[in-house]
Image: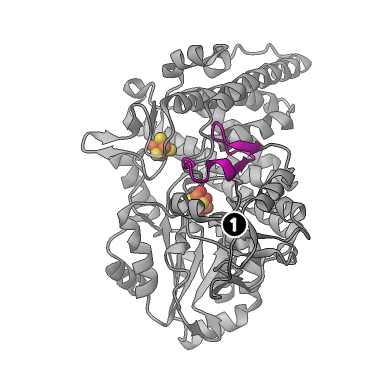
Amino acid sequence: MFCYQCEQTYRSDEGAGCAGAKGMCGKDAATADLQDILLYVCEGVGQYLHRARQLGATDIEADRFILFAFFTTLTNVNFNAAKFVELIHQASQIRDRAKALYENAARAAAKIPQTVLGPAAFVPASNMAGLSAQASEAAVRKDAAILGEDAVGARALILYGLKGVCAYAHHARVLGEERDAIYATVEHALDMLAREERDVATLLDEALALGRANFLAMEALDAANTGAFGSPTPTSVRVTPIKGKAILVSGHDLKDLHAILEATKDKGVNVYTHGEMLPAHSYPKLKAYPHLAGNYGGAWQDQQKEFAEFPGPIVMTSNCLIEPQPRYRGRIFTAGPVGWAGVRHIADENFAVVAQAAQALPGFTEDAPEKTITIGFGRDTVLGVADKVIDAVKSGAIRHFFLVGGCDGAAPGRNYYSDFADEAPEDTVILTLGCGKYRFNKHDFGTIGGLPRLLDMGQCNDAYSALVVATKLAEAFGVGVNELPLSLIVSWFEQKAAAVLLTLLALGVRNVRIGPTLPAFLTPALVDVLVEKFGVQPLGDAKSDIAASLARA
Ligand code: FSO
Ligand code: SF4
């Protein structure tokens, strides 16, 4: 195996990447190799779909499959090798269908179909042993000697950005929102990877195209979430448990949470959110369920301790799963793209078995002292008080906005983000989103001009909401987004964050600070491009970065 897609990848003086028997996340070599093969066969599907689309023929089921398949390969999503064997064979059948679609469309247009080589012609073995023997053909760095390190890094940026786009587009799709332009971009990018494009400028342009597609994916997801459950409103959320039976729901999928709330209605079971599910409490149609009781625990990297202590079943609806420990392995469930061999999987959105498990487990035996936090500052809420915000900026009451958002992780350097929030001067507002906020969202930041100083905008995909707000404020002030008194401090961990970064770059947002470390797949030359062309900055220390941001404004 070789994998360097996330921030926690193994790093040494000689280079970076998880290799050997297991990655830092617990992904074993067999699973990692099978994931590479799945993505490679999907490139083949993309080769045919891209060609068919140019002739006016599409296959939306094949596009939907690609979203799901890519999603399973994100960091901390699916660790089940057997599932990947199944997905590879499914991908191979879908590729045959895409081939026929293309060839028929070509013939209908009186053209001779091309013979497509590379991933389109790869024949996957029938079983796991055979597939493992083929892994080198699909490895991420397989042609590094021919392509060159910069091209390999730029191709990795595309592959990982694509994973983020697919994951967000899948979340939107399950709630009925799809965008054909996203499918067209995904197919185009797959075809580019398949034909071993090595021109770095072309590859970086493609990465920016994916950034634009990711904006569409986040917009679709925003439309899906708000369309189904209403627009987030400021909401006080209990962060301490109450007596009674309990279920914990983690991940990003609001549709699954809704199904769990329905399955537990009037059954005397309380539902708690974990990690990225926290923003669910601010959606009117979800908070209308009285048994959506509160938020439990912190960000994903603390789950092994927190899940062990939780006295009920746990459901993982998307990233970020860590190896389930014996103390809770029997009461954790996966759903959607998530998987772990031997852990019960809910494939049909029927969570009755989870509701039953909650009844059979002890639940919390007493109320903990009440403690709450306030969330729910989505685009509508913030723009609803835009006049107040604009006046506060004009009068000098608000000097600056810091968006401190993104993923959390276990790296020690991540204290930077809590230091940053705590050190930000009192006349500044902190916007946040993603799970990185757990490092500071229980601190008291006070208020400013009648608004809380800490405004929680939601999940990592609600970067869309932040961009809408920034664009509207820029319009109101008659300036560009880069001229606003706004600095972005992004923490990345996995591929959704890579896609969000590409969106920021594609929309021309400059001077984004990113950390805790830069992606290992970016070579020094690629980092130089990001720094020179987009003003991307690595982190310094929190105090001096705050001072530098304020000095720039
Ligand atoms: Fe966190 Fe995990 Fe949202 Fe990421 S839950 S780390 S960007 O997968 O998804 O912020
Ligand atoms: Fe390593 Fe991250 Fe890949 Fe896991 S996902 S194998 S930790 S680089």
Taking the spot 61% from the left edge, 58% from the top edge, the residue there is 363
Direction from residue 142 to residue 373 in the image, left or right = right
Instruction: Answer yes or no: disc 1 within 8 Å of ligand 1.
Output: no
Nearer-the-camera pick, 551 or 310: 310
Q: Mark yes or no: residue 553 visible.
A: no
Would you place residue 239 above or below residue 29 in this image?
A: below
Side of 357 relative to 159 (left or right) = right
* Whole-percent x, y for residue 63 in the image: 67, 32
Q: Nearer the viewer, residue 508 or 343?
A: 343
x and y percentages locating residue 130 in the rendered image: 50, 11
Can you see residue 63? yes
Its colouring scheme is one colour
Instruction: Look at the magenta stretch and give its main secondary structure.
Output: loop
Q: Quadrant of the N terminus?
A: top left
* Image quadrant occupied by the C terminus: bottom left
Q: Residue at x 62, y 19 (%)?
A: 89
Reply yes or no: does residue 339 show up in magenta.
yes
| Furthest-bottom residue in this view | 395
List the residue tagged with mark 1.
277
Q: Please state which amino acid type lies under the numbered disc 1.
A: Met
* 517 left or right, relative to 389: left
In percent of width and height, residue 387 lies at 61, 82
Circle 1 residues within 10 Å: few <14, some 14–19, many ≥20: many
Q: On the image, which quarter does residue 213 sit in?
A: top right
Magenta residues, as a range? 323-345
Q: Is residue 318 magenta?
A: no
Please indicate whether residue 96 sits to the left or right of residue 416 in the image. Answer: right
Q: Quadrant of residue 289?
A: bottom right
Residue 413: x percent and y percent? 31, 56
Ligand 2 quadrant in view: top left
Q: Is residue 469 above or below residue 9?
A: below
Is 552 in front, or is 166?
166
